Amino acid sequence: MKFQQFLTKHTTQITLITGILIILGYLSQYLLQFTRGYQLSLIAASIIAVVPIASRAWSALINKVFSIELLVSIAVIGAFIIGEFNESAIVTFLFLFGSYLESKTLQKTRTAIKGLTEMAPTTATVVTTTGTKTVDVDDVDEGDLVLVKTGGQIPVDGLVTEGNGYLNEASITGESRPIVKTTGDPVYAGTLVENGYVKLTATQVGDDTTFAKIIELVEEAQDTKSKAEKFIDRFAQYYTPAVLVLSSLVFIFSRDFRLAITILVLGCPGALVIGAPVSNVAGIGNGAKRGILIKGGEVIDTFAKVDTLVFDKTGTLTQGKTAVTSFKAYQPTTTAILTTAAAIERLSDHPLGQAIVTYAQQHPTSMSAPTLTTTETVKGQGITAQIAQQQVVIGNQKLLAAHHIKLTTAQLTDLNTMQQAGQSTVIMATDGQVQAIFGIADQIRPQVKASLAALKAQGIKRLVMLTGDNQLTANAVAHELAIDDVHANLMPAEKVTYVQQLQAAGHTVAFIGDGINDSPSIANADIGIAMGSGTDVTIETSDVVLMQSSFPALVHAHGLAKKTVLNTRENIFIAIATVAFLLVGLIFGYIYMASGMFVHEASILVVIFNAMRLLKFKTNFDKTQAQSPTTPVTA
């Protein structure tokens, strides 16, 4: 075991020594005419190089695996028997050098993991009763108060209890734009405080943090094999013995030992074995850099076949936050209306009232807020308030009816238009006269419509929305986004039933939800996709996690899956075509052991470099977004 570890550790040096000995041998032969030195150098090079190769072959045989190294080792022994030391030296050197380049190239496909692990925090500043102290991040407990200043790194998941700042959450969401965090906001380990400071109460520590789970998820994903990889593994188990049998038969019938040995070497399926894994690793790495976590090669295969996307509405197609989307004023003093409405609604914690307050803040004025003499909250209807000598009523139609306030024909038309668009309405009246109507709705996520169009352009045939919301609101959202089919007023179990009906009809279904109340549907779909900021349920339930909750990221993930599958097929074709080319060339006398081994190793590198193109993959939609960036919408 120690000897094998030594060989593994020093394989690069062994490869270098082998190359130097080969060069010295040829210099001895052609410059010094020293044939003995030529032979001794190549014999030494062959022996030194074959040791690590034979060691790997023996380890594989112990585990009942017929490896490529076994073919090379037998070929070297055969070359020694026929006295072709130059062939054995060159074959072993090219094999080791190809393995070296292969390992170096594969490292580049794992840069996403390396980058994540390097960003992992190691220490934390814990606030104590006597001040602060710096401790190892593993010593932080849930409930501890942690201080992070400008330039510092959030060491654990938690909630901000004091302070505010701009945080770079690229390690979690892939979004490098700084996010404002204030009291009560969640923060995640691995993110950076670019400006300001925060004190946070630790809620998840150690391996339970979102950041740690992301690293674990991507590492596991890169080790999870696709159907193509599993097929190739089974194929290689039968292919290697088949080459051994073929070589033996060639020797038996032709008595050409050199030809038999050459078949052993050229028949090595190196590019075939490496082709599928390197494509999947590169594809998963590309996604990880963009905050897209794909759980393995099999997920990639299935995602590429998806023809139907099923969406939850609230929190998925929409942001899950209400906002004023329509505002109709029937008095010329719009500023006074907004100021008065906001002053009254500040007394309420109802989402519709808070939406009006936010809308007023987005339209600031120098007018001071009026003094409220008395107020009364009517449950399920709204608020009445006395301002100076005026009575202000703000709420729904029931509240207005209770105060005998009627809407004009034009006002009723506006009200019906807003309600038909799926908006909740709040009416404001002063002294019996309607002054304004607010239309309030859950905001659709930025770039959703363009993203859905891009998904259809990439091959998605059907878009379906399943929601527990009312049919009117659901229809309005579906109409705006050009969704093909919509079903409303559904319970979680009914969503699962509909997903299963689509699958029974022969569709490959991906369900996109927020990862909490939609987890049953996510789990039952062929591909479950979570739009969320990395909650436990989000990460554990779904097959794909979009940490940024971004629809352009969904477009990229789907395009990446299709491109990765195509890239895998290209690599398999290259590998099979190379073996066929070598064997045909061998039969017709154009290919020999050394030249064939060179082509063989070159094919491995071609396969790897082809897969590496995935690291820089962008969809057409990505390129369009880069050319015409849009201003992000603040939720």
Image (cartoon, rainbow, N blue to C red):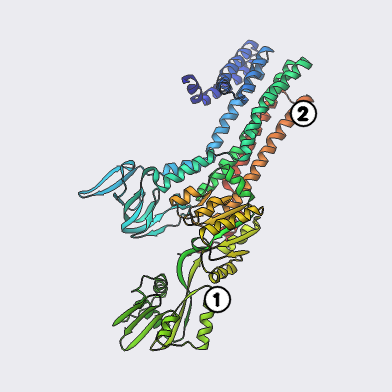
* x, y percent for residue 98: 60, 29
* x, y percent for residue 117: 43, 42
Report the front residue among 40 and 119: 119
The secondary element bearing badge 2 is classed as helix
Kind of residue at disc 2: Val
Residue 371 in view, yes or no: no
In the rendered view, tell whether residue 470 sits above or below residue 582: below
Gap between marks 1 and 2 measured at Cα: 71 Å
Foreground mark, 1 or 2? 1
* x, y percent for residue 566: 66, 45
Residue 175 in view, yes or no: yes
In the rendered view, tell whether residue 347 sits above or below residue 38: below
Q: Quadrant of residue 398?
A: bottom left
Q: Residues within 10 Å of mark 1 (few under 14, many from 20)?
A: some
The secondary element bearing badge 1 is classed as helix
In the rendered view, tell whether residue 585 sits above or below residue 166: above
In the rendered structure, which disc, 1 or 2, sits on the residue that comes first in sequence?
Answer: 1
Report the front residue among 472 and 633: 472
Q: Residue at x 59, y 18 (%)?
A: 45
Residue 134 shown left or right of residue 82 in the figure: left
Is the Cβ of the residue at disc 1 closer than 8 Å to that at disc 2? no
Q: Residues within 10 Å of mark 2 (few under 14, many from 20)?
A: few
Residue farthest to the top? 36
Residue 427 shown left or right of residue 71 in the figure: left
Residue 27: mark: none
Residue identifier under label 2: 584
* x, y percent for residue 351: 41, 70
Residue 420: mark: 1
In the rendered view, tell whether residue 134 sits above or below residue 324: above
Q: Quadrant of the C terminus?
A: bottom left
Residue 74 shown left or right of residue 10 in the figure: right
Kind of residue at disc 1: Gln
